[in-house]
Image: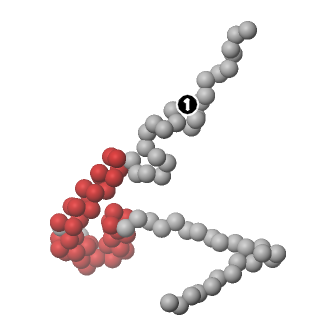
Amino acid sequence: MTNTTKPKIGKNRGNAGKGRPKGSPNKITQEFRDTVKHLLDDNADNVAIWLSQVATGTEDAKADPKGALDILSRLAEFAAPKLARTEVVGDRENPIIVQTVNF
C-alpha cells in the first residue's frame, strides 16, 4: 500500500515551533520603527519647525494646515501604536454589566 497523501500547504506545514511567535513584530519592521522613532526624537525641534512651515506656508510654498495635520498623524504612528477598534455586544438574555470600582 502506498502513501498518497499530499503535503500540507498553508499555515500548518509541519514547522511548528520554528520562526517568530504569532503576534510578535517582525525584526526588520521593529528595527525600522526604532530607527524612525530615534530620528524623530533627535529632530523634535526641527519637526515642529517643519510642521509649522507646512501649516503656515513659506516663500516657496502655500500654507497647508491640512497637510501639516496629515504629516503629524503619519509620524504619530511611529511614536504610539494604533489602537484597534473594538465593539462589545451583549444580547437580551445576557446583557453586559459594566461595574466601576473606586479604590
Question: Which residue ends up furthest to the front in the rendered image?
Answer: 103
Q: How is the image coloured?
A: secondary structure
- Could you tell me residue 8's position as x and y percent? 61, 28
* Element marked by disc 1: loop
In this rendering, the answer to whether 39 lies above or below 87 is: above
Q: Quadrant of residue 70?
A: bottom left
Pointer 1 local density, CA inside 10 Å: few below 14, some 14–19, many at least 20:
few
Residue at (29, 52) in percent of width and height: 32
Residue holding disc 1: 14
Q: Nearer the viewer, residue 86 or 45?
A: 86
- Quadrant position of the N terminus in the picture: top right
Question: Which residue ends up furthest to the top in the rendered image?
Answer: 1
From where the camera sits, is residue 87 visible? yes
Q: Nearer the viewer, residue 16 or 85?
A: 16
Residue at (21, 67) in percent of width and height: 41
Would residue 68 appear left or right of 85 to someone viewing this image?
Answer: left
- Could you tell me residue 25's position as x and y percent? 40, 51
Question: Which residue ends up furthest to the bottom in the rendered image?
Answer: 102
Count the marks.
1
- Could you tell me residue 9's position as x and y percent? 59, 30
The amino acid on which the numbered mark 1 sits, given as a three-letter code, is: Gly
Would residue 92 appear left or right of 26 to someone viewing this image?
Answer: right
Residue at (50, 90) in percent of width and height: 103
Q: Quadrant of residue 38?
A: bottom left
- Could you tell me residue 67's position as x and y percent? 34, 70
From where the camera sits, is residue 74 visible? no
Residue at (37, 64) in percent of width and height: 77
